[in-house]
Image (cartoon, helix red, strand yellow):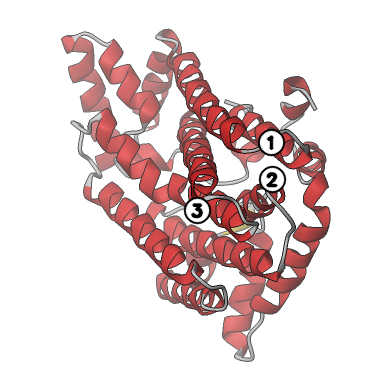
Amino acid sequence: MNAEGLAAEESPIGRSQVLAHLYGPIAGDMEKLREYLVAEFKSAEPYVHELLEHLSQFRGKQIRPACVFLAGRCFGEIRTDHVRCAAVVELIHTATLVHDDLLDQADVRRRVETIHTRYGDRASILLGDIIYARGFVISTEVEGAARLLAECTREICIGEIMQVGNAGNLELTLQQYEEIIHRKTAILYGLSCKLGAMLSGASPEQADALERYGNRMGEAFQIIDDSLDLVGDPELVGKSLGTDLGNGKLTLPVLMLREALDQSGRDHLLQLLKTCHESEDAAKERQEIAHLLAEHRIMEQVKERARAVIQDALDSLRAAADPGPARQRLEDLAEYILQREL
């Protein structure tokens, strides 16, 4: 599928067609994962079961577990341990979504009311903790995986804490931003690819190269996601947007805009950002920031930055894995992430 095909209509039907192509070589593996997860989203306790049933509606593209399978098929066959690790990766990701929605005060996730909005903050925190715990139990069934997955989760939490600690920090540097997105997002992509490769017998060097591919792809994913929060269409993206400015998060588009302005313009931008963070009614300020982003063609520059990151990911992938259906789908997956509508 070419770039135009991957940039197909950003509707649920369009996305499902693209994903059907991307996941073609691992369709059977993904089905085993879905069957495995059905059992994980059940509980004998009625209220917990209700929460899990609601949460099951959040099921998205499942890119991270797909990376486990595709990376694995680059080097060998898929076994039960791949399914277990793919399930743990998806559970960790799901738990972070539950907590992230609370931290961001987001009302909608994948066109469904978020857990904290419907059931309250306490239920949201505890449900996320339950999912993390279950993931760690499963990880102990795969030799050598538990420590890697636990350390990855720790890094994700540190990334989230760094983001919370920098809320309202108008002097955030590009280096700090990159460290935050690496920890909170990219590292789970990287580990997914590394685990898949390791479990299929890849050499340590090959596994490390696949991890770099995943890390860089995850960074590009977060760069695009941050951009969508500023200029995306909530109906297309399927979740609450515009939360970053309200939460005082400086993301790549804003950082690049800040650097593009002269001192007077920069001072004015910082005042706009401060108002967005401190006031619940900052529609005018948000519109002005959007205007400045368009005037200085920042989103085009962001897209180019993301493209360079994706190219680095592809270079690592191609150096480690031989050509084949699985590698081609990993290449297509990187392009798909880049083509998400800005």
SS of the residue under disc 3? helix
Instruction: Count the numbered circles shown.
Output: 3
Q: Is residue 269 left or right of residue 310?
A: left
- The residue under the point 46% across, 37% down is 219
Report the front residue among 161 and 213.
Answer: 213
Any part of residue 249 in sight? no
Q: In this rendering, is residue 55 above or below 282?
A: below
Q: Image quadrant of residue 328?
A: top right
Residue bearing mark 3: 191
Report the front residue among 314 and 109.
Answer: 314
Where is residue 134? Give x, y as percent: 53, 78
> Label 3 neighbourhood size at 10 Å, few (<14), some (14-19), many (20+)?
many
Q: The residue under label 3 is which amino acid type?
A: Leu
- For marks 2 and 1, the one nearer the N-term is 2
Query: In front of the other: label 3 or label 1?
Result: 1
Q: The residue under label 1 is which amino acid type?
A: Asp
Residue 74, numbered label: 2
Q: Is residue 249 left or right of residue 311?
A: left
SS of the residue under disc 1? loop
Quadrant, the C terminus: top right
